[in-house]
């Protein structure tokens, strides 16, 4: 399947993407994970992106498009992909449309995961992330803590609160979402690709998508 997952930070895009990869071997492509990996590794890309990310601002469109143009041409994308956190602005959506046309790829669906703001805020402040850039497993201090406090179940690295998950950075990220990313809902509605699911629980979202795709 070839999908875009839209939704505010904390809507569960990453969780839904992981569940979907298990269905047909499509790959999850998270621009946030790619960028955090680059920051940790100290690459040129990471150095350019770091300041924006810490403040909860978007990284410039040109940087993101450079990453995605390469990523979508890697062989593992042939089976399908789930775009998680991209596109995030109208210019990115327009550039993606052109890129996909050039590569001869067509999207199956754009899923808009709609979750109430109170749920989002609660999730983001209690979210914790494995600091190992190759793992980046996600935990929640209330609903799914690691077995041993502060230690990742999967890789043994430290589980920490992301720098952009302080209350101030979170409200800034949500404002940025409303201003820059929410307009994509209308963009993809016009393209005839939009499917909105209102659900707090990721399994319900996945079942809705399966139904829509006839899986
Ligand atoms: P979220 O939980 O906000 O969905 P992500 O992991 O997707 O977080 O992204 C973390 C940060 O990485 C964003 O706040 C932004 O700075 C940067 N980022 C990720 N994807 C994009 C994108 N498509 N365009 C611009 N910046 C991005
Ligand atoms: Zn880990």
Image (cartoon, rainbow, N blue to C red):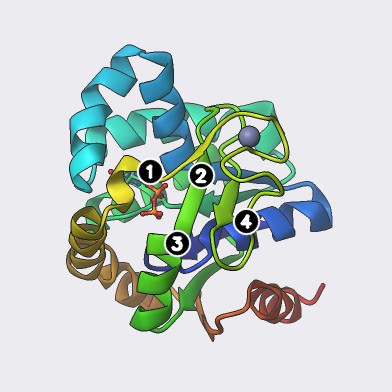
**Is residue 80 positioned above or below 199 on the image?**
above
Residue 36 point in image, percent of width and height: 41, 32
Q: Earlier in the sequence, mark 1 or mark 4?
A: 4
Residue 189 point in image, percent of width and height: 40, 78
Q: Is mark 3 on a helix, strand or loop?
A: helix
Residue 59 point in image, percent of width and height: 24, 39
Q: Mark 4 points at which residue?
A: 145
Q: Name the residue under label 3.
A: 126
How far apart are the two marked residues, 1 and 4, measured between alpha carbons? 15 Å
Quarter residue 41 falls in: top left
Q: Name the residue under label 1.
A: 162
88 or 2, which is in the foreground? 88
Asked whether mark 4 lies closer than 8 Å to ligand 2, one says no
Q: In this rendering, does residue 79 appear at all?
A: yes
Q: Are marks 2 and 3 in contact (CB under 8 Å)?
A: no
Q: What element carries label 1?
A: loop
Q: Residues within 10 Å of mark 3 (few under 14, many from 20)?
A: some
Q: Mark 2 points at which residue?
A: 129
Which circle, 1 or 4, is nearer the viewer?
Answer: 4
Q: Which of marks 1 and 2 is nearer the N terminus?
A: 2
Q: How crowded is mark 4: few (under 14 residues within 10 Å), some or many (20 or more)?
A: some
Q: Do the residues labelled 1 and 3 touch (CB within 8 Å)?
A: no
Quadrant showing the C terminus: bottom right
């Amino acid at each position: 399947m070839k999908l875009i997952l839209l939704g505010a930070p904390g809507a569960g895009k990453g969780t839904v993407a992981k569940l979907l990869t298990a269905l047909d071997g499509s790959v999850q492509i998270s621009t946030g994970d790619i960028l955090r990996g680059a920051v940790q590794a100290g690459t040129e890309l990471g150095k350019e992106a770091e300041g924006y990310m810490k403040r909860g601002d978007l990284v410039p469109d040109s940087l993101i498009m450079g990453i995605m143009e390469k990523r979508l041409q890697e062989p593992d994308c042939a089976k399908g992909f789930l775009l998680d956190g991209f596109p995030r602005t109208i210019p990115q959506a327009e550039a993606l449309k052109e890129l996909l046309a050039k590569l001869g790829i067509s999207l199956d669906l754009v899923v808009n995961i709609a979750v109430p703001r109170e749920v989002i805020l609660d999730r983001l402040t209690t979210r914790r992330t494995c600091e190992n850039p190759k793992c980046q497993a996600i935990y929640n201090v209330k609903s799914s803590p690691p077995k041993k406090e502060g230690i990742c179940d999967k890789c043994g690295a430290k589980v920490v609160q992301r720098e952009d998950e302080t209350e101030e950075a979170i409200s800034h990220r949500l404002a940025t979402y409303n201003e820059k990313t929410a307009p994509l809902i209308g963009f993809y509605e016009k393209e005839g690709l939009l499917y909105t699911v209102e659900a707090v629980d990721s399994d319900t979202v996945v079942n809705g998508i399966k139904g829509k795709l006839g899986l």
